[in-house]
Amino acid sequence: MAFSLNSYPIVYRAHFSDSAWTESWIEKPHRTPAEEAAMNDADREKLSASRNFYDDLPLVNYTTQYGLGCFEGLKALPQKDGGLAIFRPDRNAARFNKSMKGLLMPGFPEDSFLKAAIGAVRKNADLGFRPAYKSEWEKDSFASADSVYIRPFSYSEGGIGVAPSKNPWVMVICTPVSAYFSAGRSKATTTDRIRATPRGTGWIKASSNYVISTLAKHEANDEGYMECVFLDAKEGKYLEEGSSCNIFVRLKSGELVTPELGDTILPGITRLSVIELAKDRGVKVSERKISIDEALDQGAECFVTGTAAGVTPIESLTHKGKTAVFNGGKVGDLSAELRDALKGIQYGTLPDTKGWMVKV
Ligand SMILES: *Cc1c(COP(=O)(O)O)cnc(C)c1O
């Protein structure tokens, strides 16, 4: 169940009309988790798939036809001391509101977002739909750990003329997930495709941004790489992002560099958190332009960050036939330290000194 869809039954829905959001909770078909586990695979998959169908949402609309939609991704993590906690949902709430407005939709109130995300996890957990903490996860730094992935997204009203959505829905679904990138394959290559252009939507978590990412990542996978790395649109020279992750390079000098935010970089919450964790450790962190040549020549470690990816080390980076292998192909010390620090806070094995975790 790496990153596959198996929607939990309880879904949040809000609809914007007459200048106000109307909220509701939907209970999709389900049995108890134990009964579902006992079903044969085909029946269980059929039941699970049925939860992803809605009869009363418009088929032809600005989201399905023109990609005018945005989304969020955040996780609720089983805690060592029991319970579930969500990582920095206030940040996702703020970013979602900005994304909606950036696509000329009405903003979605941050407090509604928080209540929806927490409520969705809690209501499903109350029915037994939640992963339980396993101490064996601690042995491999939570590489195989389970969590609840929360996916809020916008969905437009019906319409076929090209226009922004004025009366969107906001839906929040939950699905269980485990590791995003498969272990042991962490080679990356640059792509000459362009993810985001200046004055475009790269800074918004817009569905449409994922078209180019999907193509480029698929091509990289076909060539045997786990991940692709985008360079800037203007000069094709500076690192921007991974396919759906932010990127960091630790230079031989010790400096940790990640591209500065701008209109072509998605402001990742994992990125922000890793910057803070690295600074706490006395590491010099720079948010600045870093060229592919500098990364290849001076890079000592490299990793990508995101809600799904966590901190995922990159063993090598290839660009136009030239390959830099970082740290002899082994996970670098700083990458491992930051990954472990983040996972420890998220799963409650380390104290949450920053108040990042919100209990469900
Ligand atoms: C979501 C996303 C990220 C990571 O953001 P997080 O908040 O850390 O999950 C990075 N890049 C892109 C393009 C994204 O869509």
Image: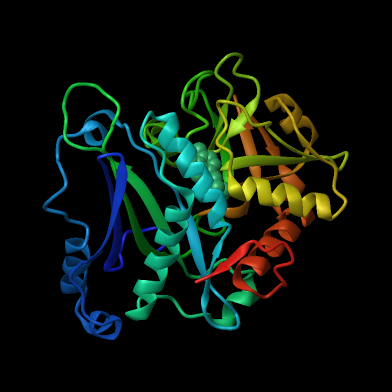
Q: Note whether residue 244 is visible.
A: no
Asked whether the viewer can see residue 218, the reply is: yes
Q: Determine whether, in the image, residue 86 is placed left or right of residue 275.
A: left
Compared with 5, 235 (above or below) is above
Q: Measured along the vertical axis of the image, is residue 65 above or below residue 97?
A: above
**Which of these two is toward me, 28 or 321?**
28
Pinpoint residue 208: horizontal percent, then vertical percent.
Answer: 37, 32
Q: Quadrant of the N terminus?
A: bottom left
Picture quadrant where residue 18 is located: top left
Q: Quadrant of residue 284?
A: top right
Most extreme residue toward the top is: 234
Q: Is residue 40 left or right of residue 135?
A: left
Residue 21: give x, y in percent of width and height. Answer: 31, 48
* Snapshot colouring: rainbow
Can you say whether 44 is above or below 51 in the image? below
For the image, the number of numbered tags is 0
> In the image, what residue occupies the spot 40% across and 67% down?
119
Between residues 170 and 191, which one lies in front from this camera angle? 170
**Measured from the top left, where is residue 253 in percent x and y?**
88, 39
Residue occupying the point 43% across, 33% down: 101
Taking depth in this image into account, of 182 and 147 the one nearest to the observer is 147
Q: Residue at x 88, y 51 (%)?
A: 282
